[in-house]
Image (cartoon, helix red, strand yellow):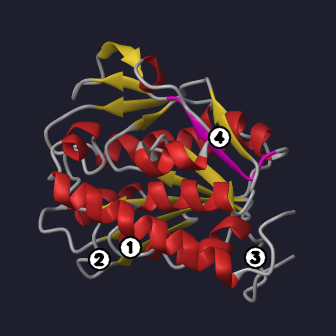
Amino acid sequence: MNSENNTPLPDVSICLASYNGSKYIADQIKSIIQACDSVENLVWELIVSDDLSTDNTIEIIRPLMPKNGLIISGSNLGISKNFENAILKSRGHFIVLSDQDDVWEIGRISYILDKLKRHDLVVCNLKFVDSKLSPLGFSMWDNITPSSSLALNIFRNRFTGAAMAFKREVFEEIYPFPKGILHDVWIGCASLLLKYRVCFLPGSPILFRRHDNNNSDVGRRQRVLRFRVFSSRIILVFSLFRILISKKSVFR
């Protein structure tokens, strides 16, 4: 299948949400290009949605963008809607989310594409590193156990956006992302509700930086006021109920 301008539709769309990411984003874009180019005959694209950065993020990434890359502007959307904005501009069959401050290892794309042959959404493990990419000696799932239980993920989320990849039809069924819920929580929980095939991968082909300015840092989430956590759970349950009743059947 070809697009209107007679160029092949990409197999994979890398969707990166940026905001004031000048300190680390160059490393991430370079690693994305290396990981994608290492897969033979892969047609891919990179979509960067920048949420009106006030630093020089755009000036840094513009010369690094591949020919199959696109920079679009958000409008102070916030992280979840900024990712949604990137996905809406993408065209690939597989959607891979990317934070602006991580680094992908060379086998990242081949690893998840192999698993997406049999699953609709995959979540890989993450290696924690410091701001200079020095290993911290542990991974994301050393401290938590991934689970495909919808009830558990509603109350204690196991999905991390930086580690997620999914088929386009998943996005099309769960769009739009509700306000007041983090995008990874929504994608994960809605996918479980709709009986998509979800797989947690033990491999950790991403170097996940821990630093004071993480947009999706676990520590930041832990500092969120209890009221906001409770409120987001209420919104999540309501949104899941709404998507449930809008479908004729959740079974496939």
Which residue has dot 2 on it?
77
Q: Residue furthest bottom?
A: 4
Q: Quadrant of the C terminus?
A: bottom right
**Crowd tier of the residue under label 2, counting other residues whose Cα lies within 10 Å: few below 14, some 14–19, many 20 or above:** some
Q: Which mark is residue 7?
A: 3
Find out whether the residues at labels 2 and 1 contact each other: C-beta distance under 8 Å. Answer: yes
Q: Amino acid at mark 1?
A: Lys
Nearer-N-terminus badge (1/4): 1
**Crowd tier of the residue under label 3, counting other residues whose Cα lies within 10 Å: few below 14, some 14–19, many 20 or above:** few
In front: mark 1 or mark 4?
1
Report how far apart the C-alphas of labels 2 and 1 lie in the structure. 5 Å
Q: Residue 140, relative to residue 93: is it above or below?
A: above
Q: Amino acid at mark 4?
A: Ile
What is the magenta range?
119-125
Q: Amino acid at mark 3?
A: Thr
Residue at (28%, 65%) from the top-left corner?
A: 231
- Image location (x, y in percent) of residue 24: 26, 43
Which residue has dot 1 on it?
81
Which residue has dot 4 on it?
109
- Image location (x, y in percent) of residue 108: 60, 35
Report how far apart the C-alphas of labels 2 and 3 lie in the structure. 30 Å
Report how far apart the C-alphas of labels 2 and 4 lie in the structure. 28 Å
Asked if residue 121 is among those painted magenta in the image, a careful observer would answer yes
- Res. 243 visible in picture: yes
Report how far apart the C-alphas of labels 1 and 4 lie in the structure. 24 Å
In front: mark 3 or mark 4?
4
